[in-house]
Amino acid sequence: MENKDTHRKLNNYACASVLAASTVSAIFGYVSGVMSGALIFIQEDLEISDLEIQVLAGMLHLCALPSSLVAGRTSDYIGRRYTIILASFAFLLGTVLMGYGASYLILMIGNCILGIGVGFALVVASVYSAEISPPSSRGFFTSLPQVSLNIGLLLGYMANYFFEKLSLKLGWRMMVAVPSIPSLVLIILMLKLVESPRWLVMQGRVGEARKVLLLVSNTKEEAENRLREIKGVVGIDENCTQDIVEVPKRTRSGEGALKELFCNASPSVRRMLIAAIGLHLFLRIGGSGGIYLYSPRVFQRTGITNKSKLMLATVGMGVSKVVSSLISMFLSDKFGRRILLLISATGVVVSLLGLGFCLSIVEHSKEKVVWASSFTIILTYLFVGFMSIGIGPVTWVYSSEILPLRFRAQGLGLCVVLNRITTVIVVTSFISIYKAITMGGIFFLFAAINAFALCFYYTLPETKGRLLEDMEIVFEKNSKLEIQMKPHSSNLQ
């Protein structure tokens, strides 16, 4: 076992690789952020209804469904690196079409292509980050895609504010076309970076995997230990020294993984699947997607009608998200995933209850209630902050690290499909629901959902510092106490 300082050291090559891969998350974040403001200008320019706006917003997430479903199998077949390139190409084509934006139909097509890229990006960025990262700093590295997403969101909000000053026809087109540049850069960059060592071992390319692990591990001993663990999971003799090893086709391509996951999985793997699916379900039905996308409408309820001020208010949300996700990135490996989830969910519930209360007062008062309007903005920022310090990033960190190698890409793909389905439901119904039960009512509804989520998070075991190959041991027993008491040499903390 290596000394404590070695474990805390961040590997520069691993950091660079994960940062590059996380750019695809930043692009998605930018698109999500910029659309919150762009939709206002698109509706005014193209003279379309609220229903058409909801459909346009939902198309991004709806078209992410099929690509999310095949993203796991695709990344098992062509590799994590080329799947990121595929996502980047979809972002490039989609943003060019959106920027052209000659009609509502063109916008729908462009948004659909963007959605395809989103489906691939959400799956593969997390898988690649988890598989590249050393165990001692995996929480830090696997938080990078979510941090990048939040930075992208902030940049999207800032683009809304600055491009709003251009003419109506040019402004929103510039907003949505910007991601075409980083998409092209990422395609070129990913061609230069290494493939996931775990995917290489799945293909029998053990020699290449060893070279990659030597680059992304802190010591040669750590690299050899990681390689030995991966070979054991894939079914290769740990003492095998060959660079090229024949492995079954099912292992190389991930064939039959989903069927096995549902029909023949062990109790511990079933618990992993329930944990991963539950995290993604509560992340989205808790209302975050709708609140982020329609935040300008929330702020309009407080009396902010000037479009420039509305865009500036959303920038504050972006700042809150970035700061909180950065804090989460540094705390995840120190305090663990579970404690961040519990703190986050508690703060989210309190913030949503406060928002429901303040917005109810605003909506039922004939005159402007300054204190309630001010607290609505503050509580929105607090909601965003609490969501981004735990539930947001930890959902992706936890779900990408707990599933066994054979099921990881396709299992996470399944989680992303559920993530997108619930996002589509929330963003396409948010306006209709708040018109039916009031804006305050919808926040009370989200508070109740997140209270249930808090109970679910309490049942999850801690995973910090564990090797990816050890997760079945972590989930072998239901009791968190029993898991903590079980001695294990791979626990690096």
Image (cartoon, rainbow, N blue to C red):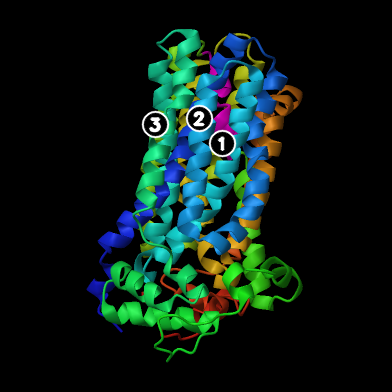
Viewer-proximal residue among 132 and 344: 132
What residue would you read off at disc 2? Answer: 95
Q: Residue at x 62, y 60 (%)?
A: 73
Above or below for 317 versus 192: above
Q: Report how far apart the C-alphas of labels 2 and 1 lie in the structure.
A: 7 Å
Which region is colored magenta?
288-303
Q: Amino acid at mark 2?
A: Thr
**Residue beneath the point at 49% across and 9% down:** 168
Residue 404: x %, y % from top left: 57, 72
Asked if residue 245 lies left or right of residue 433, the reply is left
In which quarter of the view is residue 358 placed? top right
Q: CA distance from mark 2 to mark 3?
A: 15 Å
Image spot of residue 64 (x, y percent)? 63, 43
**Observer-nearest residue: 188 or 442?**
188
Pointer 1 residue = 114
**293 magenta-colored:** yes
> Looking at the image, which is closer to me, 455 or 267?
267
Q: Quadrant of the C terminus?
A: bottom left
* Residue 137 falls inside the magenta stretch: no
Left or right, residue 379 beside residue 325:
right
SS at mark 1 in the image = helix
Give the SS element for disc 3: helix
User: In which quadrant will I find the N terminus?
Assistant: bottom left
- Give the residue pinned by disc 3: 155
Q: Residues within 10 Å of mark 3 (few under 14, many from 20)?
A: many
Q: CA distance from mark 3 to mark 1?
A: 18 Å
Residue type (three-letter) at the residue carrying disc 1: Leu
